[in-house]
């Protein structure tokens, strides 16, 4: 997207902006003239992204941090507050995946994943909510997944974390009514990124990260609670969601068995 598209945000914080969906989103925002605070642990990936956006009208500011470390987020917020560069929109996208068969089930492995996907997101939400509630204005979008709709094979910890995020956002949506603060949940299907490159099965309706970023920006502007894509795939998953357990388990076994 190299044309100027008028977007309603001045500065957007994107976590997990070093690669994949976050990098595609940060790129689109910068080319649309929006400044981006780009976070991830790997400073080198953020630097490469910054270099690729040298000619963009929006400025990409590198903010390396680990979302599982609350003090790193707090110090970032203090700096932004002091400099007057707090974001008016935060896309809490950072996350990871660690698929494993049930024979490899380890509590610690699940906790490591939840520490990023669930607790890391909570760490980001705390200062955002405090600040946005105080100023009675602000916009937050939390990256969950269609994998949070119902249980899927080899995704016990990933799905549980994403289901928790969806429920958390539903709850916050109700609590934030009338506060001036908007919260949305993003539920993508499969997107081709380093995260899904580890999947050893055929991924139906696989999207490119640029298309996912476009769908996210459209959804953020529309402000409906859930941003989900791609459309037809999501409709199928929502139908599966309302099936009784016996039908649901049969359907999922059949679908996943038919994959290579
Ligand atoms: N790809 C899909 O099909 C898909 C579908 C549904 C939902 N999602 C969700 O979308 C989000 C992005 O996924 P992706 O596919 O773009 O993954 P990705 O390509 O692996 O990128 C993940 C990003 O998150 C950052 N990150 C990971 N752990 C972090 C931590 N502790 N602190 C700060 N940043 C961290 C990574 O950078 P560092 O490792 O350098 O920190 C990287 O920039 C995730 O929440 C994922 O669950 C993805």
Image (cartoon, grey):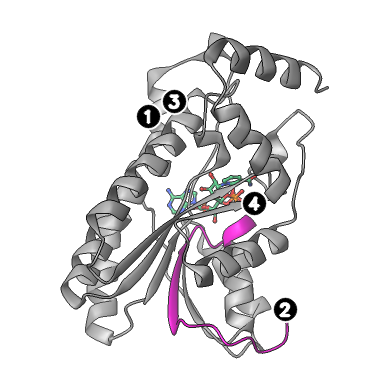
Range covered by the magenta-colored residues:
1-22
- The tag on residue 229 is 4
> Residue 1 got which mark?
2
Spatial CA distance of label 1 from label 2 is 38 Å
Q: Quadrant of residue 114?
A: top left
Disc 2 under 8 Å from ligand 1? The reply is: no
**Marks 4 and 3, Cα distance to the nearest angstrom?**
29 Å
Secondary structure category for the residue under label 2: loop
Q: Residue at x 64, y 62 (%)?
A: 215
Please tell me which of labels 3 and 2 falls first in the chain.
2
Q: Give the quadrant of the N terminus.
A: bottom right
Rendered residue at 26%/70% (across/down) = 77
**For mark 3, what is the residue?**
109
Of helix, strand and loop, which one carries label 4?
Answer: strand
Distance between the alpha carbons at the discs numbered 3 and 1:
5 Å
Near-viewer residue (198 or 231): 231
- 6 in the magenta segment: yes
Q: Is residue 135 above or below residue 66?
A: below
Distance of mark 3 from mark 2, alpha carbons?
39 Å
Q: Which mark lies nearer to you, 3 or 2?
A: 2
- The location of residue 18, given as percent across then percent down, is 57, 61
Q: Secondary structure at mark 1?
A: helix
Q: Which mark is residue 111?
A: 1
- Measured as percent of width and height from the top left, residue 92 is found at 43, 57
């Amino acid at each position: 997207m190299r044309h100027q598209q008028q977007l309603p945000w001045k500065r957007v914080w994107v976590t997990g902006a070093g690669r994949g969906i976050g990098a595609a989103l940060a790129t689109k925002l910068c080319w649309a003239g929006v400044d981006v605070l780009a976070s991830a642990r790997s400073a080198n990936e953020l630097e490469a992204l910054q270099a690729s956006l040298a000619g963009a009208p929006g400025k990409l500011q590198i903010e390396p941090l680990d979302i599982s470390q609350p003090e790193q987020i707090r110090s970032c917020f203090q700096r932004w507050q002091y400099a007057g560069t707090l974001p008016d929109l935060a896309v809490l996208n950072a996350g990871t995946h660690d698929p494993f068969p049930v024979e490899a089930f380890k509590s610690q492995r699940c906790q490591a994943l939840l520490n990023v996907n669930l607790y890391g997101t909570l760490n980001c939400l705390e200062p955002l909510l405090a600040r946005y509630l105080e100023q009675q204005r602000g916009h937050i979008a939390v990256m969950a997944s269609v994998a949070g709709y119902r249980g899927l094979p080899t995704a016990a910890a990933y799905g549980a974390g994403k289901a928790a995020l969806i429920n958390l956002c539903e709850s916050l949506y109700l609590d934030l009514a009338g506060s001036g603060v908007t919260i949305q949940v993003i539920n993508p299907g499969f997107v081709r990124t380093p995260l899904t490159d580890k999947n050893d099965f055929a991924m139906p309706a696989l999207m490119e990260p640029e298309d996912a970023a476009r769908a996210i920006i459209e959804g953020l502007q529309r402000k409906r609670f859930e941003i989900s894509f791609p459309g037809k795939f999501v409709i199928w998953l929502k139908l599966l969601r309302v099936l009784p357990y016996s039908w649901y388990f049969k359907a999922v076994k059949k679908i996943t068995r038919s994959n290579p």
